[in-house]
Image: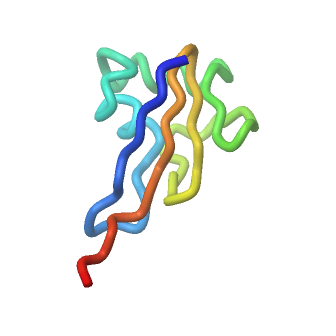
Amino acid sequence: MIELTIQLQDQPYIELNKLLKLMDVVDSGGMANQLILEGDVFVNDSPAHEKRKKIRPGDVVQVGDHRIRIQQQEQPL
């Protein structure tokens, strides 16, 4: 399993298809959309079928052998 982590900066969420492309899990947005629509992408252990599903801090996205954990940006003291 390939474990990846991303911190959201200055935004409360990221859309699922954009996350997969940003994290280089897929080569294109079209490929991300296809995997999502085919039920090959899971959010918090449930199949995700919405291309633009809002992924927020605390969520875990899994596709194939990739697991992506979403974290909130740490605030400086």
Give 1 or 11, whichever is nearer the viewer: 1
Query: Can you give x and y, in whole percent of width and height, for residue 4 in the image?
Result: 42, 33
- As drawn, is 53 to the left or to the right of 8? right
Q: Is residue 31 above or below residue 49?
A: above
Q: Residue at x 68, y 23 (%)?
A: 39
- As drawn, is 7 to the left or to the right of 43? left
Q: Residue furthest bottom?
A: 77
Q: Residue at x 59, y 29 (%)?
A: 62
Q: Is residue 44 above or below residue 40?
A: below
Query: Can you give x and y, in whole percent of width and height, for residue 9 in the image?
Result: 27, 62
- As drawn, is 9 to the left or to the right of 39? left
Give 55 or 1, whichever is nearer the viewer: 1
Q: Is residue 44 above or below residue 42?
A: below
The colour scheme used here is rainbow
- As drawn, is 29 to the left or to the right of 33? left
The mark tally for this picture is: 0
Q: Residue furthest front?
A: 77
Q: Residue at x 39, y 21 (%)?
A: 25
Query: Can you give x and y, in whole percent of width and height, for residue 37 in the image?
Result: 60, 25
Query: Can you give x and y, in whole percent of width and height, for residue 52 in the image?
Result: 48, 45
Q: Residue at x 61, y 27 (%)?
A: 41
Give 38 or 23, whichever is nearer the viewer: 23
Q: Is residue 17 above or below residue 29?
A: below
Specify the quadrant that holds the C terminus. bottom left
Corner quadrant of residue 35: top right
